[in-house]
Image: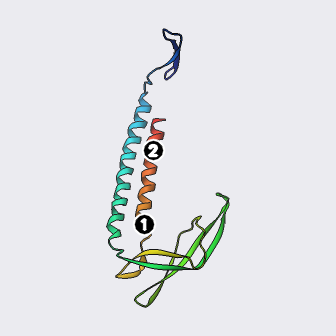
Amino acid sequence: MPENDTANTKKRHGKGKKKKYRHVYTESEKVKIFFGVIVAIALIAAGIHYIARQFTVNNEYDMEVTAVVTSVSRKYDKDEDQYRYRATYEYEVKGQKYEYVSSWSSTHYEKGDQMLLNVNSDNPGDVNNYKYLTIGAFIIIAAVFVLYFSFH
């Protein structure tokens, strides 16, 4: 009977039950799984490192400011069949004006919209965009895919 197949067996009262057979891994599958697990562990460690770095960096952004959208750019994304938007914000710290340009996103911004930004009080032009958190999350998601494909 083929590996990882099922067979119907009859119970005493006529109800069928599927019996699963244990899959026996070949040497090449074992090697693939071994290296997949090693790569996934390395990716998870890197992802945790970036996420921890974000928490350290958050301490540098010790001032919250209200920013106002001054302009909005729009572009059509053919792959996602939707428009993407990028806002330019203006905010003020100690009488000095600063600008921050957001990333492209599906969030529709309007001129005059307000947003709270975390900035570095020593360098108010530096806005916390949580890039390390984003990088760490993507790396951990990649690790999950590596594990999934190692076993399938």
The image quarter containing residue 72 is bottom right
The image position of residue 60, as x and y in percent, is 33, 74
The tag on residue 63 is none
Q: Residues within 10 Å of mark 1 (few under 14, many from 20)?
A: few
Identified at 43% across, 54% down, the residue is: 139
Front residue (pair 66, 70): 66
Asked whether, in this view, residue 114 is left or right of residue 22, the answer is right
Q: Residues within 10 Å of mark 2 (few under 14, many from 20)?
A: many
Decide: is 4 above or below 45.
above
Going by the numbered disc 2, the residue's amino acid type is Val
For mark 2, give the secondary structure: helix
Q: Position of residue 34 (x, y in %)?
A: 38, 38
Provide the residue designation for mark 2.
Answer: 146
For image coordinates 38% across by 55% down, the residue present is 47
**In terms of image quadrants, where is residue 74?**
bottom right
Query: What type is the residue that disc 1 sits on?
Result: Tyr
Seen from the viewer's position, the closer of residues 83 and 11 is 11
The residue wearing badge 1 is 130
* For discs 2 and 1, the disc positioned in front in the rendered view: 1
Task: Report, in whole angstroms, how far the alpha carbon at label 2 lies from the one at label 1.
Answer: 25 Å
Q: Which of the 4 image quadrants contains residue 112?
A: bottom right
On the image, the x and y values in percent for residue 57 come to 34, 69
Measuring 36% from the left and 64% from the top, which residue is drawn there? Answer: 54
Residue furthest to the bottom in view is: 95
Measured along the vertical axis of the image, is residue 31 above or below residue 127?
above
Give the mark nearest the N terminus, 2 or 1.
Answer: 1
Q: What colouring does the structure picture have?
A: rainbow
Please determine whether, in this image, residue 131 is positioned above or below residue 122.
Answer: above
Residue farthest to the front, as pictured: 13
Residue at the location (43% across, 56% down)?
137
Element at label 1: loop
